[in-house]
Structures are given as C-alpha cells and as structure tokens.
Image (cartoon, rainbow, N blue to C red):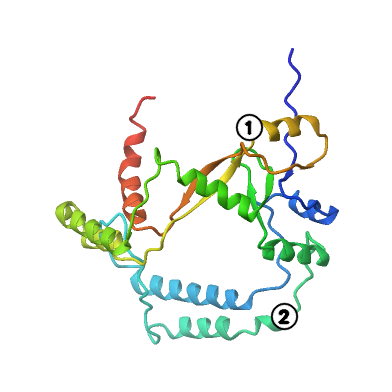
Amino acid sequence: MEPPDQPIPKLINLTSNELSPDQIYILSKGLKFTPTPQKSNYTEIQDDISNFCRKLRLTEEFFDQDNEDESLVRNKSDYTPPRGINLTLDKYCEYITDFPYENIQHQRIKSNLKKTDWNIISDLQNNKNIVIKEADKGSAVFIMGTDYYKNLILNMLQDYTYYESVANYKQQKIIAKLIVLVNLYRKGLTKKECDYITNFKCKTSQIYGLPKIHKSQKITEACKLTKSSCINICAPNDLKMRPIVAGPACETHRLSNFLDILLKPFLKHIKF
C-alpha cells in the first residue's frame, strides 16, 4: 500500500526575503480569511437604509399591479417613488434615516485579529515588491517577487499558439459590432433585453495567473522534503501559471449572461 501524499505547505515563499513568524501566522490563514471589521461603517449603513426605504416605497406603489413584462434580463431602474403617497411610510423612513446610529454603544465584538496583525496586513498589502497569489489547486499561498511574476505572465502571453496581439484595440468597435448583431436578431428580444445587452458601462478585462504547484519539479520536491507549513526556495524557472481573464464588466459579459439564462433549461436534457 502506497503512503499518502505529502501535504502541501500552506505558504510557498519564492522571494529572497524570509517571512517573519507574524507574517507566516497571517498568511497561513489563507486568502479567503475575512478579518472582523475594526469599526462600523456608518456610510454603508446609511446606504443600506436608503435602499431599504426605496424598496418599501416601490412595494407600496406597485404591489397590486400586474407585471406583464416578459424580459429575462433588464438594466436596473433608478426610479424612486415620490413622498406623500403614504404619510405613515414617510414618517417611518424619516425615523430610520435620521436615527443617530453612530451614538449607539455597540457591544464589543470579539475580533479574530490583534491590532498588530492589522499592521502586518497593511504592510503586506502595500509592499509593491511582492505578489501574493493562491495556488491553482489547493489553498497554498504563493509569495513571489513582482518582476518574477510579471515575467511569468508575459512569457505565457508570448506563446502565439494560444494568444494573439491585437493592435489598436478599441472597446467601442466591439460594442458597435454587438449592437449590429443584436439589431439583426432583435425580433425575438424585448426592448429591455436589447438595452441590457448593449447599454452599459464596460471595463477592460484583466489577466492574472495562479501558480501550478505540480508543474514545477523544484517546488514539488521541496514540498515532499519539508514538514513545515512554510517553505522558502529560490524562484524556479519551470513554474507554470494558470491564466485567469477577469472580465466582470467586459464588452460581451451581458450577452454571455443572457445566453447562460437561455441555455440553462436545456442542460437537464443533455446526457453525459
């Protein structure tokens, strides 16, 4: 019977600088760790109250009206019903909006971090010489030099088998082509669906990479030999990255979301 695989360390430091015990303690918690807020965000509270009051007014105005709109997607409306329709509702909204929440003596919440831990988080976050990424598989945290990380990404993009350089790329050209496509097939779309797909503020997508532990022989061997939660090794030349294109507001993300909604009902009929 083969022995179980050696567990992967929580931290893999590829820089020349050794991590302090406090830094190791913080980073070992993983990149999904959520610190307890140090103080209440009263601006956020006021925004939540404003949205809550708007929903109350919308419900009060439209609760008994039939909605005949069959649109599967639509842009969010910023309409807010005027005051004066329901005086009791107006008074309630005024009360919760003007209430001095900042003067409430909140019960002290037990923090999951010490004050010194916040300083360490701030130092790591503002250190421009390092890049911190989670491994492609598992939850190990990689600490890499910024230049080393950038070179890995650039070398990956220079593989023209999978990537192509586009000169003079312009978002407006893609949007214009998208509008032509939607107008060509708009017979089956509602006005709100067409507006949702083409009328929004788009942002340029960004690419980043997640390190592949098992693609590097040097890292794999170091993981097998160590019993520590953190290993320090020189940046290997055989490390590969998994490319991730982050485009939550790219030119075609609305169209992709709409197609996903249309195709989902058919998935249950597909035999794998």
**Residue linked to disc 1:** 214
Label 1: which secondary element: helix
Amino acid type of the residue that numbered disc 2 sits on in the rendered structure:
Ile
Which residue appears farthest toward the right when viewing the image?
Answer: 21
Q: Nearer the viewer, mark 2 or mark 1?
A: 1
Rate crowding at label 1 as few (under 14), some (14 to 19) or many (20 or more) other CA atoms within 10 Å.
Answer: some
Crowding at dot 2, Cα within 10 Å, few <14 / some 14-19 / many 20+, comes out as few
Mark 1: which amino acid?
Answer: His
Q: Which one is in front, 151 or 109?
A: 151
| Residues under numbered marks 2 and 1 in contact, where contact means CB atoms less than 8 Å apart | no
Q: Position of residue 51 (x, y in %)?
A: 48, 73
Q: Farthest top residue?
A: 1
213 in relation to 175, above or below: above
**Marked residue nearer the N-terminal end (2 or 1):** 2
Q: Residue at x 64, y 34 (%)?
A: 216
Q: Say which quarter of the image contains residue 229.
A: top right
Q: x%, y% of residue 214?
A: 63, 32
Is residue 67 at all visible to an observer of this figure? no
Quadrant (top left, top right, bottom left, bottom right) of the C terminus? top left
Q: Is residue 109 left or right of residue 191?
A: right
Quarter of the rendering occupied by the N terminus:
top right
| Element under disc 2 | loop
Is residue 167 in view from this perspective? yes
- Say which mark, if any, is on residue 104: 2
Picture coordinates of residue 78, whole percent (x, y): 37, 74
- Residue 268: x and y, percent? 36, 33
